[in-house]
């Protein structure tokens, strides 16, 4: 093999790799693993009577993944006339936030991130607000919507 042939083959291989990489990245952003087509799975959380009249209440819900029962937490918030569910997972590094009733804010114990009752960042390193989860009330029961893996089911 000549030096020219080797360099030509190498350049062609690099160009093919770049084109393949750009195509893969474009496909990922255009069609991110079917997430747009998926709908949340609603998991039963509590009875409607247990909803907070005002402020924040921590609750748990159950779901199943690959035959294993899992439990997760959620904050149910009634604030400014609205009712919504907030994920307790800090947007900074995934720590679990706690709610301080005296200050009316969520506080991350790991890095000092703080969120208001709406889940918006008010101090510290978190780059984004707490995630809002779909919430619905039907027939006297409260349900939280979660995006489970394709193989999982709500309990």
Image (tube, rainbow, N blue to C red):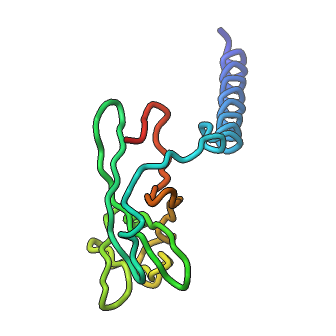
**Image quadrant in which you'd find residue 113:** bottom left
Q: Is residue 134 left or right of residue 140?
A: right
Give the side of residue 115 with respect to residue 97, left or right. Answer: right
Name the outermost residue toward the front: 139
Where is residue 119? Give x, y as percent.
47, 75
Q: Position of residue 150 (x, y in %)?
A: 50, 33
Would you say residue 93 is visible in this rendering?
no
The residue shown at (65%, 34%) is 24
Picture residue at 46% right of the left edge, 56% below the top: 144
Q: On screen, 150 above or below 101?
A: above
- Image mark count: 0
Q: In which quarter of the image is the C terminus?
A: top left
- Residue placed most toward the observer, 138 or 97: 138
Give the side of residue 148 with respect to residue 39, left or right.
left
Q: Residue 97: where, in percent of width, then height?
A: 33, 70
Along the line of sight, the residue nearer the viewer: 145 or 53: 53
Q: Residue at (69%, 37%) from the top-left corner?
A: 27
**Residue positioned most to the bottom:** 102
Q: Indicate the quadrant where residue 15 lies.
A: top right
Q: Is residue 11 visible?
A: yes
Q: In this view, does 12 lie above or below 122?
A: above
The quarter of the rendered structure image containing the N terminus is top right
Residue closer to the observer: 51 or 144: 51
Point 27% across, 74% down: residue = 109
**Outermost residue to the top:** 1
* Rendering quarter of residue 61: bottom left
């Amino acid at each position: 093999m000549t030096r020219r042939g080797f360099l030509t083959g190498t350049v062609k291989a690099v160009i093919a790799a770049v084109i393949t990489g750009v195509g893969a990245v474009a496909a990922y952003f255009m069609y991110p693993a079917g997430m747009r087509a998926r709908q949340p799975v609603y998991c039963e959380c509590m009875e409607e009577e247990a909803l907070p009249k005002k402020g924040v209440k921590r609750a748990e819900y159950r779901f199943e993944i690959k035959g294993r029962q899992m439990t997760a937490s959620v904050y149910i918030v009634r604030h400014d006339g609205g009712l919504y569910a907030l994920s307790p997972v800090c947007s900074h590094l995934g720590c679990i936030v706690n709610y301080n009733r005296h200050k009316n804010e969520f506080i991350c114990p790991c890095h000092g991130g703080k969120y208001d009752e709406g889940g918006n960042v008010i101090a510290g390193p978190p780059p984004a607000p707490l995630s809002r989860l779909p919430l619905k009330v039907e027939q006297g029961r409260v349900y939280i919507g979660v995006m489970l893996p394709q193989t999982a089911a709500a309990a």
